[in-house]
Amino acid sequence: MRVGLWQLGQSITRRLSQAGKKGKFEELARRGFATEGELKKTVLHDFHVEHGGKMVPFAGWSMPIQYKDSIMDSTINCRTNGGLFDVSHMCGLSLNGKDCIPFLEKLVIADVAGLARGTGTLTVFTNEKGGAIDDSVITKVTDEHIYLVVNAGCRDKDLAHIESHMKIFKSKGGDVNWHIHDERSLLALQGPLAAPVLQMLTKNDLSKMYFSDFHMLDINGSACFLTRTGYTGEDGFEISVPSEHAVELAKAILEKSEGKVRLTGLGARDSLRLEAGLCLYGNDMEQHVTPVEAGLTWAIGKRRRAEGGFLGAEVILKQLAEGPPVRRVGLLSSGPPPRSHSEILDSASQPLGEVTSGGFSPCLKKNIAMGYVKSGSHKAGTELKVIVRGKTYDAVITKMPFVPTKYYKPS
């Protein structure tokens, strides 16, 4: 499992404050990150450095963990004003062809055919055992065009998985092709000022665009893919922009906000998504975890529950009928913040599960975490214990999200 980005951010901040400190990249490599010489750079890399970005290896890329402000301040500013994230390390791709929807439905749990044009949803790519290969936001642009974004750390295995199944599908006469959007960069603009700031850069009326909606439109003079979504729990957008215009767009967003929207790094992105109760693949979801166990039952379309037809459907539909053996839960705790792999005990100090993500919530000013416990011990209000650094502390299961979400939906 990956170390939590919030935790990584604190560690990096401490190390970078020690002038002349050597070996920071070697330590990261031991944790599963790429070494400095191997790192890819987004087109905004120099822009990040110019603005004080502290760059770290993440999923094979050099990415900003934070800027001049602290991760806590950056998190709070995103919720009160806005944050601009470079997420160009993620992989955007399009599936095209008259059979692209039935093809994709063999690989994911979503009712893709049932989506209205120009709308999307979170889904999960599953394996034959019902486990999660990756989670992804997919959009039905038209009946013959699906746009999706997959996680940077899963890019190679996701593309290999899709390609292998596509070859089989096409060999049987299926009409589907793909295009990987390496010519584009991806920016995420999140927070209360996201819509008013972006509105100044486009003639399209964003008030008519709701959460999960997708449009192709002109933003700051560039032909962009715009999805009203994000990974923070706030209202906001993900903007796929031609890479040659990415820096110009980032500058325009920051200028139009008059300094209120700030460049925001992976550290705050992690604390924001944890406060919103959202999974981080590699921490809270793995290939042995099913969507039902991960609390993503809502993402399995009604028709898909009735018909199946996706990889691992037999396992997943059985869990829907009988209940899963474990469940993802939210936790509040005393003492130091629990981290990934912190053991969870029941009230009698018997092993019950483990934490997958945890940290100190900048907005709530308390410890929050999520993890997996045995079914039957997953109800909100259940008192537990967590082990942190060899000591036991009180904890209680609580509903998620920890911080209320503010997605823009029709009233």
Image (cartoon, helix red, strand yellow):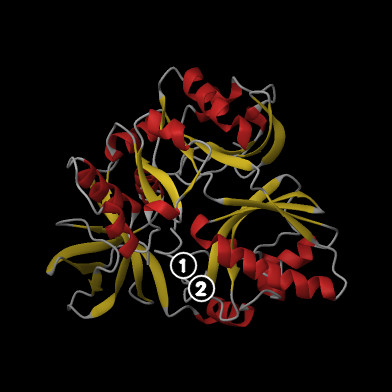
Which quadrant is the N terminus positioned in?
A: bottom left
Label annotation for residue 290: 2
Query: Of helix, strand and loop, which one carries label 2?
Result: loop
Q: In the figure, residue 355 lies in which quadrant?
A: bottom left
Q: Secondary structure at mark 1?
A: loop
Residue situated in front as seen by the camera: 373 or 61: 61
Q: How far across and down, in percent of the image, does residue 352 sit? A: 28, 77
From mark 1 to mark 2, how far is it between C-alphas?
6 Å
Please tell me whether residue 38 is drawn above or below residue 73 in the rendered image. below
Q: Do we see residue 28 in this rendering? A: yes
Amino acid under disc 2: Thr
Picture coordinates of residue 149 (x, y %)?
60, 52
Q: Which residue is mark 1?
A: 294
- Residue 379 seen in this snapshot: no
Is 102 situated left or right of 213 in this image?
right
Residue at left 65%, top 72%? 305
Q: Can you say which quadrant of the picture contains the C terminus? A: top right
Image location of residue 214, percent across then percent down: 68, 41
Q: Are marks 1 and 2 in contact (CB under 8 Å)?
A: yes
